[in-house]
Amino acid sequence: MTTLIDLDKIADVKLAQLRVFSDERGRFTEFFRKEWFPQRSWDRVQTNRSDSYASVLRGLHFHHHQVDYWCAVAGRLRVGLADLRPDSPTFGAVAAFEIGGDSQTGVFIPTGVAHGFLALTDATLCYVVDNYYDGEDEWGIAWNDPDPGHSVGCERTYPL
């Protein structure tokens, strides 16, 4: 059974410790179930795949009208999150952690939480969203923003 964990640093972010079934043929992992997130009236409308080469940095960006659920299905990612919601008890908090590799973890990212990642290896991220792509709801923060609260844990410049 999948275990859900609250990310203590940022309210409403959930980590799903996914169960992997392995045998001589390979592996099977259920990486998303609507019932895992009963606090959200979840209508999955789009599923996306993003392939990144090692050392590529993507983000930070955020949405006002879309939640994301991420799962690294190949490779390893260092995820960076920043809570930009003024009414949140964790407003201004940041978190960075790894997903992928041998540990299969899904990440539920609510609206107003900026998110991005650094590909530690060549990596594939699959993600489910509850609204169709809308360029008007894509808000970004520059990778080199001087505010340390927007750092994703990079110590050098990486190609975008």
Image (spheres, grey):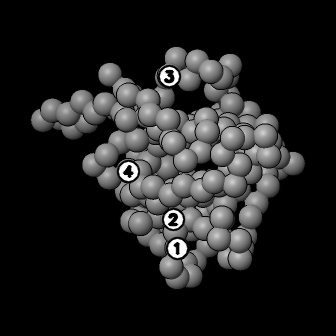
Seen in the image, is 20 located left or right of residue 41? left
Q: Which residue is drawn at the image coordinates 66% and 65% (left, top)?
A: 150
The residue that mark 4 highlights is: 100
Identify the disc placed on residue 154. 1
- Residue farthest along the bottom direction in this orientation: 156
* Amino acid of disc 4: Gly
**3D distance between C-alphas at marks 4 and 1:** 18 Å
* Amino acid of disc 2: Leu
Q: Tell me if label 2 and label 1 are in contact, CB under 8 Å.
A: yes
Residue 67: percent from left, percent from top: 67, 37
Q: Which residue is drawn at the image coordinates 55% and 78% (left, top)?
A: 158
Of marks 4 and 2, which one's residue comes earlier in the chain? 4
Mark 4 neighbour density, 10 Å: few (under 14) some (14–19) many (20 or more) = many
Q: Which residue is drawn at the image coordinates 44% and 34% (left, top)?
A: 5
The residue that mark 2 highlights is: 118
Q: Quadrant of residue 59?
A: bottom right
* Amino acid of disc 1: Cys
The residue that mark 3 highlights is: 36
**3D distance between C-alphas at marks 2 and 1:** 8 Å
Residue 14 appears in the rendering = yes
**3D distance between C-alphas at marks 2 and 3:** 26 Å
Determine whether 79 is above or below 20 in the image: below
